[in-house]
Image (cartoon, rainbow, N blue to C red):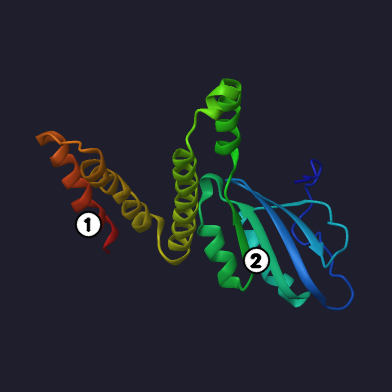
Amino acid sequence: MYIDKTSDRQPGFFQASPGKAHALKLGIDVHADRYVVVRQIDGNTPQPAQTFPPGACLDWVKTQFALAERVHTCYEAGPFGYGLHRALTALGATNYVIRTCVVLVFAWCLAIPALRESSLAAVSRKTWVFLALSGLATGLSWVCYFRALQLGKASQVAPVDKLSVAIAIVLAIVFLGERLNLRESIGAGLVVVGAPVMALK
């Protein structure tokens, strides 16, 4: 995303285009103390970036609905979660939250140097199928997780998500024949009991 390094203008720098646009798009670079916004009206060239304090940015977004039939916003979740998403959708914007792909890129950077043609050939078809199913399940789980964060609070959603630990233990017992000792059983039980206790308000 292009960022205007010299942009120290006050909110309101963007001027309205003549008439009402069909769609207005806002790309937001989120920081703890500021939001950097790039605006595009219909298919025109994106306008220079502008820096806003977080509260002022949301106030400015409200004014954009008078300029276009639809307002689309987009930002990367990063460590800031989905509070901004809820605020933008409450204003009436169609917001898209982008999940970072750094983990995927980093994983392939580690894996590619270790790959050999012979090692790939040794991977069975069954293994490839389970890898594909695992990737599909992971993607679906993130979709469900994002949807839950849209509907509820992170303090409620996160504990329920951690129930995956208990599910993994059950699957290990059923399919892998693993056995839990007393300490592990107590720990798994605390996870199962603690998650709904934290999620219920």
| Place of residue 168 in the rendered image (x, y in percent of width and height, measured from the top left) | 29, 44
Q: Residue at x 77, y 75 (%)?
A: 68
Q: From this view, report whether residue 58 is shown above or below residue 176.
A: below
Circle 1: residue type: Val
Residue 115 visible, this angle: no
Dot 1 corresponds to which residue? Answer: 197
Image quarter (top left, top right, bottom left or bottom right) of the C terminus: bottom left
Find numbered disc 2 in the image and state the secondary structure of the residue it sits on: helix
Disc marking residue 59: 2
Rendering quarter of residue 93: bottom right
Residue 22 visible, this angle: yes
Give the class, few, some or many, for how many residues have Cα within 10 Å of label 2's Cα (few <14, many ≥20).
Answer: few
The reply to whether discs 2 and 1 touch (Cβ–Cβ < 8 Å) is no
| Place of residue 53 in the rendered image (x, y in percent of width and height, measured from the top left) | 64, 53
Report the front residue among 38 and 177: 177
Q: Residue at x 60, y 72 (%)?
A: 91
